[in-house]
Amino acid sequence: MSQSWKITVIVLAAAGVLSTPLIWLLDSPGAGQLAGATVQAAAGIAALVWALFQHRSPAGPADRASRTGKATGGGVTGIRRPGGRGRGSAGAERTGEADGQNSVSGIDYSN
């Protein structure tokens, strides 16, 4: 769950929990109003607890390259992320040889 959604759920749950006593203060509640207020408070508390225990979503996939071949004539032996795009981590070990112009051995962040 993203941070903005978590904040939204917490704010709405808090509003639900806080608005429940207002029903009791505005008018003498009947049995139906009391039951509705109880359900509203329980749902608000449940949403608040649920949002608090949600873990942040992972940053993205982990890209790994190891023991790759040989790059010639502009090839890449490893990982290509043009312009640094992509989420998550990237790692390269024991990548192959890079021979020739614009050949890359490892991780390529260029455009």
Image (cartoon, rainbow, N blue to C red):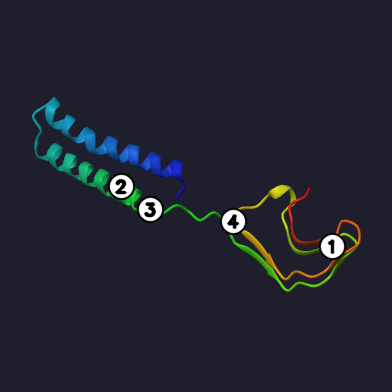
The alpha-carbon separation of the residues under discs 2 and 4 comes to 29 Å
Which residue is tagged 1?
A: 75
Percent of width and height locating residue 5: 43, 43
User: Of the residues under marks 1 and 2, which one precedes in the sequence?
Assistant: 2
**Decide: marks 1, 3 in contact (CB < 8 A)?**
no
Percent of width and height locating residue 65: 69, 68
Q: In which quarter of the image is residue 32?
A: top left
Mark identifier at residue 47: 2
Residue depicted at 12% across the width and 27% down the height: 25
Percent of width and height locating residue 64: 65, 66
User: Of the residues under marks 3 and 4, which one precedes in the sequence?
Assistant: 3
Three-letter code for the amino acid on which mark 1 is drawn: Gly
Q: Considering depth in this image, is 105 or 57 the residue closer to the camera? A: 105
Residue depicted at 18% across the width and 41% down the height: 36
Left or right of 46 in this view: 107: right
Instruction: Please tell me how crowded label 3 is: few (under 14), some (14-19), or many (20+) other residues with Cα within 10 Å.
Output: few
Which residue is tagged 4?
A: 88
Residue depicted at 33% across the width and 38% down the height: 12
Three-letter code for the amino acid on which mark 3 is drawn: Gln
Which residue is tagged 3?
A: 54
The alpha-carbon separation of the residues under discs 1 and 2 comes to 51 Å
**Decide: marks 3, 4 in contact (CB < 8 A)?**
no
Where disc 2 sits, the SS reads helix
Of the two numbered discs 1 and 2 in the rendering, the one whose residue sits closer to the viewer: 1
Left or right of 16 in this view: 86: right
The alpha-carbon separation of the residues under discs 1 and 3 comes to 42 Å
Where disc 1 sits, the SS reads loop
